[in-house]
Image (spheres, helix red, strand yellow):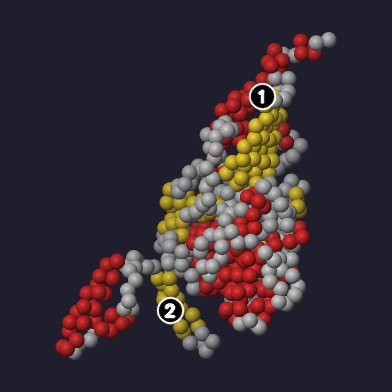
Amino acid sequence: MPHAIVPPYLLARIASIREPEFARAAEAARETLAVQRAYRPPRRSRLRLSLDGADTLVAETTPAPDRTISDAKNREELPGVVVRREGDPPTGDTAVDEAFDGLGSTFDFMWDAFLRDSISGAGSELLATVHFGRDYDNAFWDGRRMVFGDGDGEIFAGFTGSLSVIAHELGHGVIESAGGLLYRGQSGALNESIADVFGALAEQHRADQTADQASWLIGEGIFTDAVEGRALRSMIEPGTAYDDDVLGRDPQPAHMSDYIVTTDDNGGVHLNSGIPNRAFALAATTLGGRAWERAGLVWYRALTSGTLSRTADFAQFAAATLAAAEAEYGEESEEVDAVRSGWVGVGVIGNGRDEQPRA
Amino acid sequence: MDETSSRAPDERHSPEPLVVAVKRTGGFAGLTRTWTAEARGDEASELVELVHRCPWDEPVDSDPRGADRFQWNIRARCGVDEDRAAELPDHAVKGPWKELIDAVREWSESERRPAQQR
């Protein structure tokens, strides 16, 4: 939509003026509105009805998701064949319908929590491909779409059954849209951690859970029964999600003193993400209530502030969350204290009240 | 006694076993998986051919887009003086690389199967 100096509501008011002395202005406003409409992309919206505190029926128009699910038919080629678009009925294919519903839940979470309209914030499409590859043991974000394998049936039972997986992948899209975090080392681990925050919060939002009710698990239910484990990761207790004779023990560190230096996994992005994951879970559980309302908002503001470097390390992101909490709630607020204690708890910043995050 | 004289002719040409190790890290799960094939003589010939078909020395474009892709680390020892190694992003695993990785996984899993039921 083109940006204009005169806002549409004012144009509409001028266009409706009937006094003859303003006829030319009214005509010009009508023409301007007509031109704008021609350029305006189709926007999806829906009517949502709810009850407010006084049991008054509230009707509001909110954006609606625009989902397209494709089927790779067990080949490793993207995007595959489109099998379900927005407005289509369920297909009966579990992975297709789970991906469709999961994207819808994640869309709702982002709008309710942050007033964010899809990945880009401007109503972008939500694209996903399921049945990628044969026995493919992964779900990933390819820069444009979410892609889900079926799992091998021995370790992984599939990936679309867990909303935290779907919201995690969509979270990578939001991070990229917000400016990105280089997928290596600490900035890569932050990228992973923030995607996990999206994953956990989308699940908590769907279940309307408070921070103390939440499992804080990522990927619950994607292991087969043969694996000794609850999930892939625990945000609140990193390193405890599984302990299995084939997979070994969950290797995630929960504190900077156990930070893993490795060249594998782009510098351990899925390992060291345990540290900022725990910082978030600590801040959220300290604050209590719905985690997306305060801790989640602070993390989101830090990500989308426009000032976060693509190569930010843990300390720089900690500083960004503290700045976001101060801007949102004030310097002396309990939110700032909770965020600081979260980062102190994982050793990213020291104990002193005025201490700055370690560079 | 000349030990090599008692071996099959093809073994005389490859007294050292062929060892190919594949390590996969990353992915959404962040799980490390490893597969190894160790073969001699006739058994090795197919793998040797696959190893030689892979473009070990060609630079691989890194793709900055996306997240949660696998990262592959492949090492091959074809003889005393022939060690090769490559690190590949997931998008580069196609053609001969994919054939080699699939062959090593299949080899490794067929070795493991009798002892392990999953």
Q: Could you tell me which secondary element the residue under label 1 belongs to?
A: helix
* Crowding near the residue tagged with mark 1, few <14, some 14–19, many ≥20 C-alpha atoms within 10 Å: many
User: Which residue is drawn at the image coordinates 74% and 61% (left, top)?
Assistant: A256
Which image quarter: residue A11? bottom left
| In the foreground, A284 or A357 | A357
Q: Which residue is mark 1?
A: B44
Residue A103 seen in this snapshot: no
- Relative height, residue A293 to residue B116 (above, below): below
| In the foreground, A213 or A271 | A271
| In the foreground, A49 or A260 | A260
Residue A317 lies, in percent from the top left, at 62, 66
* Crowding near the residue tagged with mark 2, few <14, some 14–19, many ≥20 C-alpha atoms within 10 Å: few
User: Which residue is drawn at the image coordinates 51% and 52% (left, top)?
Assistant: B65
Which image quarter: residue A165? bottom right
Q: Nearer the viewer, mark 1 or mark 2?
A: 1
The N terminus of chain A sits in image quarter: bottom left
Residue A194 lies, in percent from the top left, at 60, 63
Label 1 chain ID:
B
Residue A319 lies, in percent from the top left, at 63, 70
Number of numbered discs on residues: 2
Q: CA distance from mark 1 to mark 2?
A: 68 Å
Label 2 chain ID:
A
- Relative height, residue B13 to residue B100 (above, below): above
Q: Could you tell me which secondary element the residue under label 2 belongs to?
A: strand
What amino acid type is highlighted by mark number 2?
Glu
User: Which residue is drawn at the image coordinates 57% and 78% (left, top)?
Assistant: A327
Q: Which residue is mark 2?
A: A60
The C terminus of chain A sits in image quarter: bottom right
| Furthest-right residue in this view | B1
What amino acid type is highlighted by mark number 1?
Ala
